Image (cartoon, rainbow, N blue to C red):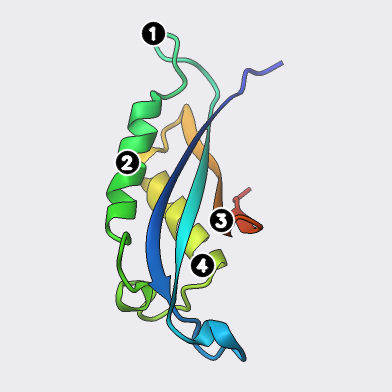
Amino acid sequence: MNARYTMKVVTDFAAAHSLREYPGECSRLHGHNWKVEIQVVATALDEIGMGLDFKVIKSETKKILDELDHYNLNDIPPFDKINPTAENIAAYLYKRLGAAINTQRVRVSALTLWETERACVTYTED
């Protein structure tokens, strides 16, 4: 059986958005305290016995979220062109974080974005 270690980090950021062409209240500018859950899978441990240091996951995630935190997402690329839906934001965060930390041994496996305490989307790729 192949080893598989899943590390999980939870963080958050605050940002506003409005959904273009949405037929309801969410078309108006409003904000969320977004919660982000990142799952990273390692297929082997490093020389000191870690899949990936949580500190690395937190640091790389913070760099990306700092670009969004306390902004209107509609003003920030790529959301100035694509609708800043929870689905699009989750995919964006997954891909950006993957570009920063993925290696042969470690990769982002899932990213869950919570818009509220009761509504979230999880993005993964095969």
Q: Residue furthest right?
A: 1
Depth check, mark 1 against mark 2: the one in front is: 2
Query: Label 3: how many residues lie within 10 Å, few (<14), some (14-19) or many (20+)?
Result: many
Element type where label 2 sits in the image: helix
Label 1 belongs to which residue? 48
Tag shown at residue 60:
2
Depth check, mark 1 against mark 3: the one in front is: 3
Image quarter hosting the N terminus:
top right
Tag shown at residue 116:
none
The location of residue 71, given as percent across then percent down, is 30, 68
Distance, label 1 to label 4, CA atoms, is 36 Å
Decide: is 36 above or below 88.
above
Mark with earlier residue (2, 3): 2
Q: Answer yes or no: do the residues labelled 4 and 3 have beta carbons within 8 Å?
A: no
Label 3 belongs to which residue? 114
Mark with earlier residue (1, 3): 1
Decide: is 112 above or below 8.
below
Element type where label 3 sits in the image: strand
Q: Answer yes or no: do the residues labelled 1 and 2 have beta carbons within 8 Å?
A: no
Element type where label 1 sits in the image: loop
Distance, label 4 to label 3, CA atoms, is 13 Å
Query: Label 4: how many residues lie within 10 Å, few (<14), some (14-19) or many (20+)?
Result: some
Mark with earlier residue (4, 3): 4
Residue type at the position of mark 4: Asn
Comparing 44 with 82, the one in front is: 82
Label 4 belongs to which residue? 88
Distance, label 2 to label 3, CA atoms, is 19 Å
Residue type at the position of mark 1: Ile
Mark with earlier residue (1, 2): 1
Q: Residue at x 52, y 72 (%)?
A: 85
Mark with earlier residue (1, 4): 1
